[in-house]
Amino acid sequence: MSSLAVHLHTAPELPNKVLNHADDIASTLAAAGIDYRQVELPTELRPGCEQAEFDAAYGLWLQALMGQEGHVQQELFNLQRNHPQKLELRARHLDEQVQASTSAWLFIGGFAQLSVRLDDYVYVLRGERGDLLSVPAGTRHWFDLGEEPHALVVRLSASEQAPVRTDDDIASRFARLGD
């Protein structure tokens, strides 16, 4: 089940609220200017599937979604606990970063955690199958696959420009996935 914890950025240990219903998550994020919705996925795939299997199941569907949403690039996070580079891949997005263009995170299988900082609040989404969260351009965020990842997630981007790390250590003050 997907969940959203809303924290004051100065109080990472205690959320103001925790939500578990998609409608509540969507309305809370919409009030902050973030689009969240659950989408109907074409098929079920497990994290760790072969790239060819992913492309056959999601290639055309994902291209259509990217066209509708204005995205031109995708990055696939497809990891299971035994992935040999799991720690390096986790570390790449674990610190706060910002992207000049809009991006969206589509959760296809397993689970992962996406944290978004807006104004005085941090919104921590534990995303699962069918969750699609759009992150406005210039929004500070970080992404956690967990120490023992089980995630099939796609980051879509409106440009080919990669996210850039900020100099803020705020992500280190919030609970990691699995804590």
Image (spheres, rainbow, N blue to C red):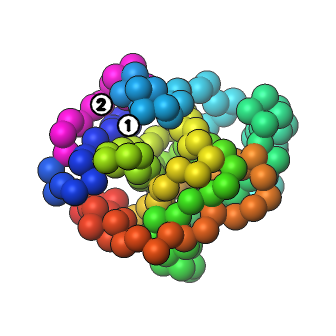
Looking at this view, is 168 or 44 the one in front? 168
Which residue is found at the position 81% from the left and 43% from the top?
A: 59
Q: Position of residue 13 (x, y in %)?
A: 16, 57
Q: Position of residue 84 (x, y in %)?
A: 56, 80
Q: Is residue 144 left or right of residue 46?
A: left
Q: Is residue 16 magenta?
A: yes
Label 2's element?
Answer: loop
Label 1's element?
Answer: loop
Circle 1 crowding by C-alpha within 10 Å: few under 14, some 14–19, many from 20: some
Q: Is residue 39 magenta?
A: no
Q: Which mark is residue 2?
A: 1
Above or below, 131 against 76 in this view is: above
- Which quarter of the figure is the N terminus placed in? top left
Residue 61 visible? The answer is: no
Residue lying furthest left: 14
Above or below, 85 against 73 in this view is: below
Which residue is found at the position 44% from the left and 43% from the top?
A: 127
Mark before the other along the chain sequence, 1 or 2: 1
Q: Which residue is mark 2?
A: 20
Q: Which mark is residue 115?
A: none
| Identity, as a three-letter code, of the amino acid under mark 1 | Ser
Q: Are marks 1 and 2 in contact (CB under 8 Å)?
A: yes
| Identity, as a three-letter code, of the amino acid under mark 2 | Asn
Q: Is residue 116 left or right of residue 79?
A: left
Which residue is found at the position 64% from the left and 51% from the top?
A: 155
Looking at this view, is 98 or 83 the one in front? 98
Q: CA distance from mark 1 to mark 2?
A: 6 Å
- Which quarter of the figure is the C terminus placed in? bottom left
Magenta stretch? 15-26
Q: Position of residue 94 (x, y in %)?
A: 45, 68
Looking at this view, is 175 or 98 the one in front? 98
